[in-house]
Image: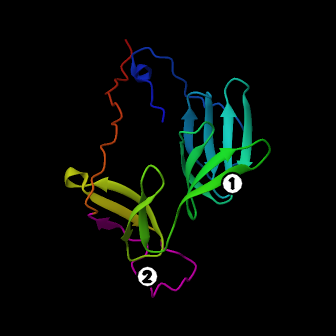
Amino acid sequence: MSRLDPSVFEAGAAMSSQAELIIDARNGAGESPVWHVVEQALYWTDIPARKLWRWTVATATAQSWDTPEMLAWMEPGQDAGGWITGMETGVLVLKPQAGEKADAQRVATVVPGLIHRFTPRGKLDRSLAVPVKKPAMCAFGGAGLGTLFVTSIRPGGGTDLSDQPLAGGLFALHPGVRGLVDTACLHQEVSNHQP
């Protein structure tokens, strides 16, 4: 994950209020931009189009790959060229290939009403139940980061919710493990005063 260089807040730092179009990608919903330091490239997803995009600085070119499902988030994987991704039905490892498709390998699956925890070697360690079919995202918080907060999805379009009336709710679980503290973003007050 890339962070903003603190020097941009220094007095006299070059700034521009003019946005420069890099690529007219026509994304339906361009999301989750991630800067890849080694490749000097920006990756992002177009969720409804089911595409992974890359724009490379050195060549000023863009490339896209079809993904098997809508892609919501991604982080660089440990394997060269691989991405850990959150998709409609679970977590997949994506590897962009030559051509227009990304190779996908399932790591975790969304199971109605369950949140799974896997070991670093990929073994299912434990499962936690929630009273909805589609738990969505998790974050640790609370005292000592011992509470696991879970968001959920509430289907629309007149879907019968009699078997999951709490769908769309925020839930709290106490799994007996603690989360890790996130790295804080550096924030400095900046004066608009010009010398």
- Residue 118 in percent (x, y) is at 43, 57
Q: Quadrant of residue 59?
A: top right
Farthest left residue in view: 143
The residue carrying mark 1 is 67
Residue 25 seen by the camera: no
Q: Which residues are magenta?
A: 154-174
Colour scheme used in the picture? rainbow
Q: Residues within 10 Å of mark 1 (few under 14, many from 20)?
A: many
| Front-most of residues 10 and 153 | 153
Q: Does dot 2 land on a helix, a strand or a loop?
A: loop
Q: Does dot 1 land on a helix, a strand or a loop?
A: loop
Up/down of 16 relative to 72, above or below: above
Quadrant the C terminus occupies: top left
Apparent side of residue 1 relative to residue 58 in the rendered image (left or right): left
- Does 72 appear in magenta? no
| Front-most of residues 174 and 4 | 174
- Residue 62 in percent (x, y) is at 73, 36
The amino acid type of the residue labelled 1 equals Thr
- What distance separates the C-alpha of mark 1 from that of mark 2? 30 Å
Disc nearer the start of the sequence (1/2)? 1
- Residue 95 in percent (x, y) is at 66, 45
Apparent side of residue 168 relative to residue 171 in the rendered image (left or right): right
Q: Residue at x 44, y 24 (%)?
A: 5
The residue carrying mark 2 is 164
Q: Quadrant of residue 49?
A: bottom right
Of circles 1 and 2, the one toward us is 1
- Residue 43 in percent (x, y) is at 62, 39
Q: Number of callouts in the render?
A: 2
Q: Residues within 10 Å of mark 2 (few under 14, many from 20)?
A: some
